[in-house]
Image (spheres, rainbow, N blue to C red):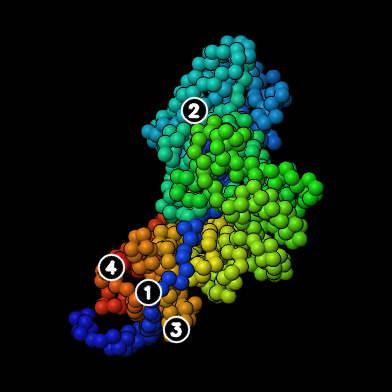
């Protein structure tokens, strides 16, 4: 053994031994952190989350409803429902059949079904859920349905969880009693854990019965709210400690056509009155067609505001500016017809902030939230570009500022971080004295490593930056082969040191997309993956979480040879202090394939000699987290001791490290 003798050697001798044994020199770096001077204040919104209903992130995901097409409002009203023993070209004397009926005079909840049961031993109505239904042994599920006894002698509605082979995994009975519409509730306790369960409805007796709004939720939702959000997914968001929540998109705001745009007013009020809409991602990509992807809006703007409140995050709603997605139709509202779109923005601010005596404040109150949501930010358009966008932005900005002068408006620079439209947008928005400009970039890992200096030269007196959508693409943008691998996450960590170093101009940042269903995705990569039972944070999630939980309040200088660390010798760094927690926080990223020995000299103030070191790394750049190994790439924390006023760190190859010390 040579360990004991090596302990007596100095740093230079150890360096020589490492070179001799491994054949690779361990690079030595000398850095200086100046704690005496604050360069810029870091905004509480610096690291947030961006939610869009893509990849079944809302219905089938965050929104815990388990029944697909619960009120028969899809374009095909029986999509998601199976009648295995029924034939539309038969009288079905040995079973029965359900037919779709239109309500008279109901513009939002248009359909219900009339079930004719001829033989109660033969008829079955089955809902397939969102790629199945995830049920857990001994867990309780709330069942709701509306029914009207039309004719005959139907005595009982039997509702069961069934497995792949038809085995019963839990059941309950409902006794319909009224010839008028009546709401019924019951509960089902699952007898087995099953990821791909379905819900089967049968009847005792024969006759005709009308059914609508058949709904099923786990009792164990986030904060125990009835008909609420999926607990494990919200917990992952909560653990990030995000500074803001941007919603509802994304391209989903724009719609392929203006008729299919997101209209927030249709997403508030009673859930059963919210008008369904096709999801613009359902057949967008030929590699992943999902024609059964619709929006029920059970997760609507009220629920987004409530989620923001739960997370302690600033709500950031994005609204249509009268332009459909320019990757699709690019349909425009004529300027002389733009007023209703602008009024939607003004009414949203009233809904969020005004007293319960106002028309929209009254609606907020009726939904159970008399207190204002204290909305401070609003976005005009998603990633529109060109003169048509600028013209519409000007109209929105004037109207909003005239009525709500303190509201902060987020504008956009288009879908790409360079090019003529990007340059045009920035020039126009600067002239208009825009407050915040949203930039998007889906690029290679190398691009992220090369662009840690992106904001170093941005005008400190110009608009502030919202890095609203970004993610390193392991293959190419929109490729179905993209992976959430360690190289992508590490490259983002390196890039984020540049975001943090430029906190004077960068005020908000968020990875995108946020979530994806393992069996229902359209886009990769994504920060959080889930199936019907489980979820996990990717390596990218872990990077975002580490930054968001260590954002600090004041930016400090950290330099090598008087220069910031922007990739020299594959090393990146940023430093902050948190005046509330009285902490010094240093972030170091090594994108080299070799270890690097880093000495950080701490000057300007005193810190505790004992701190913590959190390390995020993996053996291979192609490693990734998965359902089988959800914590393969996850942070490891240990105690760390200074040597005098120096932090001497052996940075592992391809690692992201956070050092943290208490300020004295």
Q: How far apart, in angstroms, are the residues tagged by discs 3 and 4?
A: 26 Å
Q: Are marks 2 and 1 in contact (CB under 8 Å)?
A: no
Q: Nearer the viewer, residue 180 or 200?
A: 180
Instruction: Tell me the SS state at disc 3.
Output: loop
Q: Which residue is mark 1?
A: 36
Sequence-first tag of 1 and 4: 1
Q: Where residue 19 sits: x, y (%)?
A: 35, 87
Q: Where residue 124 sits in the image (x, y, percent)?
A: 57, 25
- Taking the image as drawn, is residue 362 in sight? yes
Q: Which mark is residue 143?
A: 2
Mark 1 nearby-residue class (10 Å; few <14, some 14–19, many ≥20): few
Lower sequence index among marks 2 and 1: 1
How far is the residue under mark 1 from the one under mark 4?
13 Å
Label 3 or label 4, whichever comes before in sequence order: 3
The count of marks equals 4
In the picture shown, does residue 529 fall above or below 354? below
Marks 2/1: CA–CA distance: 61 Å
């Amino acid at each position: 053994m040579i360990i004991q003798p090596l302990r007596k050697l100095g740093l230079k001798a150890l360096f020589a031994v490492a070179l001799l044994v491994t054949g690779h020199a361990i690079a030595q770096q000398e850095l200086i952190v100046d704690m005496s001077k604050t360069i810029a204040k870091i905004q509480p919104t610096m690291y947030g989350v961006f939610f869009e209903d893509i990849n079944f992130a809302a219905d089938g995901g965050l929104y815990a409803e388990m029944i697909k097409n619960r009120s028969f409002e899809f374009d095909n009203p029986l999509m998601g429902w199976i009648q295995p023993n029924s034939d539309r070209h038969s009288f079905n004397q040995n079973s029965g059949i359900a037919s779709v009926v239109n309500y008279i005079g109901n513009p939002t909840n248009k359909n219900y079904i009339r079930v004719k049961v001829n033989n109660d031993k033969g008829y079955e109505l089955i809902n397939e859920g969102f790629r199945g239904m995830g049920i857990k042994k001994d867990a309780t599920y709330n069942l709701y349905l509306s029914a009207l006894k039309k004719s005959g002698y139907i005595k009982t509605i039997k509702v069961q969880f069934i497995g792949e082979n038809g085995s019963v995994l839990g059941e309950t009975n409902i006794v319909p009693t009224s010839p008028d519409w009546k709401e019924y509730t019951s509960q089902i306790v699952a007898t087995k854990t099953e990821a791909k369960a379905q819900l089967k409805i049968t009847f005792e007796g024969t006759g005709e019965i009308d059914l609508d709004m058949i709904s099923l939720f786990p009792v164990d939702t986030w904060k125990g709210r009835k008909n609420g959000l999926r607990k494990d997914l919200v917990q992952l968001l909560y653990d990030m400690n995000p500074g803001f929540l941007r919603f509802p998109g994304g391209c989903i705001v724009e719609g392929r056509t203006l008729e299919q745009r997101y209209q927030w007013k249709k997403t508030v009020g009673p859930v059963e009155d919210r008008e369904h809409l096709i999801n613009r991602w359902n057949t967008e990509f030929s590699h992943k067609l999902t024609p059964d992807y619709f929006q029920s809006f059970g997760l609507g703007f009220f629920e987004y505001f409530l989620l923001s409140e739960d997370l302690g995050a600033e709500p950031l709603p994005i609204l249509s500016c009268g332009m459909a997605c320019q990757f699709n139709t690019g349909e425009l509202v004529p300027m002389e017809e733009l007023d209703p779109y602008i009024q939607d923005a003004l009414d949203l601010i009233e809904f969020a902030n005004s007293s319960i005596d106002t028309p929209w404040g009254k609606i907020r109150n009726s939904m159970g939230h008399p207190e204002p949501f204290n909305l401070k930010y609003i976005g005009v358009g998603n990633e529109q570009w060109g003169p048509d966008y600028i013209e519409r932005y000007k109209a929105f900005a004037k109207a909003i500022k005239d009525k709500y002068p303190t509201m902060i408006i987020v504008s956009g620079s288009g879908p790409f971080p360079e090019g003529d439209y990007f340059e045009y947008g920035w020039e126009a928005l600067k002239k208009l004295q825009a407050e915040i400009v949203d930039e998007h970039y889906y690029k290679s890992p190398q691009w992220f490593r090369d662009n840690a200096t992106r904001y170093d030269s941005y005008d400190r007196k110009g608009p502030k930056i919202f890095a609203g959508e970004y993610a390193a693409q392991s293959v190419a943008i929109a490729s179905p082969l993209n992976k959430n691998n360690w190289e992508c996450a590490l490259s983002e960590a390196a890039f984020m040191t540049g975001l943090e170093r430029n906190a004077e101009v960068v005020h908000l940042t968020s990875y995108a997309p946020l979530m994806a269903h393992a069996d229902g995705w359209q886009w990769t990569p994504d920060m959080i993956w889930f199936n019907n039972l489980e979820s996990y944070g990717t390596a990218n999630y872990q990077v975002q979480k580490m930054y968001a939980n260590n954002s600090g309040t004041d930016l400090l200088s950290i330099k090598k040879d008087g220069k910031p660390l922007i990739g020299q010798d594959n090393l990146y760094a940023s430093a902050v202090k948190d005046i509330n927690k009285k902490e010094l926080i240093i972030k170091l990223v090594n994108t080299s394939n070799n270890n690097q020995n880093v000495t950080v000299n701490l000057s300007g103030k005193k810190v505790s000699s004992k701190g913590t070191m959190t390390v995020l790394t993996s053996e291979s750049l192609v490693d990734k987290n998965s359902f089988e190994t959800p914590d393969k790439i996850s942070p490891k924390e240990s105690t760390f001791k200074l040597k005098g006023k120096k932090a001497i760190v052996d940075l592992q190859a391809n690692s992201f490290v956070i050092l943290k010390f208490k300020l004295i």
